[in-house]
Image (cartoon, rainbow, N blue to C red):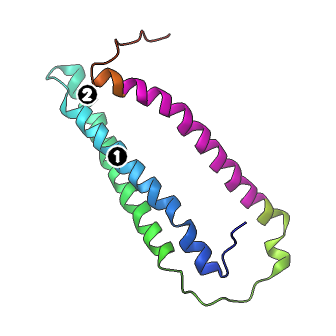
Amino acid sequence: MNKPQTCGQGLAEHSVVPSTLADLMSSLADNLERHADALLDDEAARTEHAAYLTLFTRARDIAVALESLGDQMAGSRDLPMGGHDIAKLSSPEAVGAFQRYVQVTRDLMALLQRLDTQNEEMLAMMRGSLPPRPQSR
């Protein structure tokens, strides 16, 4: 395992998480905005447009916050190494918190793999290479 030498280096190494999530949220916002722009001018479309406007605005705000977090973590690379209470770092609470991080990371990978298949099908439909598949109920 490639272990960072300092906590600051560990923060910098993991800064890719919020930075990548920022890219994901930004691209989600772009897609929500494109969808909103494609709506026609009827009552239902106006209601849908209002919902999408709120969603893509919030997604952009979240992307900015995540990018800022990633930048701050990356900028922590040269933090001096402070003393640590090893008992607290190996406490059930600390182990549980890290275990949850590991599990959420695995869950996210599985989710993204499932979505990738659906997204590829949608992309193919958008490009005109596949007929639309019937929606399951």
Q: Which residues are magenta?
A: 96-122
Q: Choose top left, top right, bottom left or bottom right for residue 14.
A: bottom right
Image height check: is 36 above or below 15? above
Q: Position of residue 117 (x, y in %)?
A: 49, 28
Q: Nearer the viewer, mark 2 or mark 1?
A: 1
* Three-letter residue code for mark 1: Ser
**What residue does disc 2 label?**
47
Residue 3 is a magenta residue: no
Going 50% across and 32% down the picture, which residue do you hit?
115
Image height check: is 42 above or below 112? above
Q: Position of residue 17 (x, y in %)?
A: 52, 59
**What residue does disc 1 label?**
27
Near mark 1 (Cα within 10 A), the count class, few <14, some 14-19 or many ≥20, is: some
For marks 2 and 1, give the CA distance. 23 Å
Going 79% across and 73% down the picture, which residue do you hit?
89
Going 82% across and 79% down the picture, which residue do you hit?
86
Which sits in the foreground, 75 or 68?
75
- Earlier residue among tags 2 and 1: 1
Q: Position of residue 108 (x, y in %)?
A: 59, 44
Query: Residue lying farthest left?
Result: 41
On screen, residue 134 versus residue 97, left or right, reads left
**Total labels drawn:** 2
